[in-house]
Image (cartoon, coloured by chain):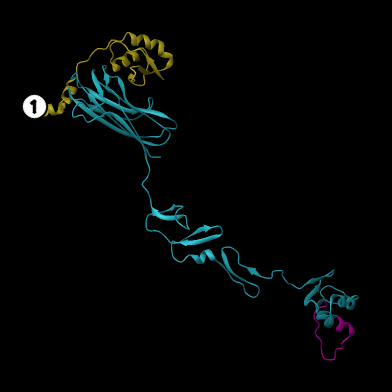
Chain colours: A cyan, B yellow
Amino acid sequence: MAGAGYKLYSTGDVLSASDVNTYLQQQTVMVFASAAARTTALASVLSEGLITYLKDTDALEIYSGSAWVGYGSGDITGVTAGTGISGGGTSGTVTVTNSMATEITAAGDIIVGTGSGTFDNLPIGTTNQVLTADTTVSPYKVKWASAGAASLTSQTANLSANVSMPSANTFYDGPSITLAAGTWLLIGQVSIEDPGANGGRNTAKLWDGTTVSTSVDSTQPSGSTIGMTMSAFVSPASSTTYKVSVANSQPTHNILANTTTNSAGNTSRITATKIA
Amino acid sequence: MNIQFKQPKTLDGQQLIEELAQAGIIAADIPNIDLDGNMWIDINAKDESQASAIIAAHVAVLKPISIEDKLASVGLSIADLKAALGL
């Protein structure tokens, strides 16, 4: 029967019918006109491992022990290039190529979609340019362009009227500003007048009514007007009012809203610039 | 917490804070007067009543300007003065 394996014959050995059947006939490729002819011929000798070739279908088949099965043949009949690749074939060694990769011709090139299922090579821009969306640029809709200047939000609040500071060692509120949540650079300035020629020492603080962000001390020459400036970064979590408050160790001073000479305008104010 | 009080007729914030401290009331800072003229002091809420009485009785004593402040008001210090006098 098939599967007898290999037998080494020696000189003088008798070649029996069994040897012919099992070592020769049943272990060769038997050729039949059709499957029906094969069935008829092998009805009584079917065994696992038989190999046949059917002339009508050009099929090489093996008997598995229960059925005739194809001899190692796949069902792929060809490789066709789809979107984004090229090449393909129906026989032999088949090569497919990534079309996006071959579109790149130089360092820095990027592949940009130009439509549904289409793309093109966008060469690199110049140093420090950034990729920018621009729907007017055909067909890419993007372009390399110089980075624009950062857009910062700023607010200014001026003190609307002079604030009298009749009492010593008491903070008087000056300019104030209300900021939305974010991170801000605050710059506060106040001008302090000493109409009573009492001099003294000024303390100014920039705060939210509870937490002092920064403060500054300055001696007030008798009868003078001095300016005090301070700055701080603040990060309110919600809408918060910040203000500059000033105290002097002596009574009778003023926080000025406007300069008293030369009409230069506002002199006590808070400027806030949102940086994040 | 910041509590609003009626302003006394005369006020020295540092003197007032010291008067409060003598009664065991600790203020976080000297008084603050907002743009509406309201006076606020940051103290413990339980001390509000006692503080009100102390504030109402407060009379500011104007302290003479110190020598240091007088010199500072013209841009000088005691060291400058000593140096000028050869001391």
The residue marked by circle 1 belongs to what chain?
B
Q: In which quarter of the image is residue B63?
A: top left
| SS assignment at label 1 | helix
| Residue A193: percent from left, percent from top | 22, 23
| Residue A28: percent from left, percent from top | 80, 81
| Residue A162: percent from left, percent from top | 27, 22
Q: Give the range drawn in magenta.
A: A3-21
Residue at point 34%, 15% (across, down): B21
Residue at point 86%, 84% (across, down): A20
State the quadrant of the C terminus of chain B: top left
Q: Main secondary structure of the magenta part?
A: loop
* A139 horizontally vs A206: left or right: right
Q: In this view, does B9 lie above or below A238?
A: above
Q: Quadrant of residue A118?
A: bottom right
Closer-to-camera residue (A183/A127): A127
* B64 horizontally vs A38: left or right: left
Crowd tier of the residue under label 1, counting other residues whose Cα lies within 10 Å: few below 14, some 14–19, many 20 or above: few
In the picture of the structure, the residue carrying the numbered disc 1 is B85
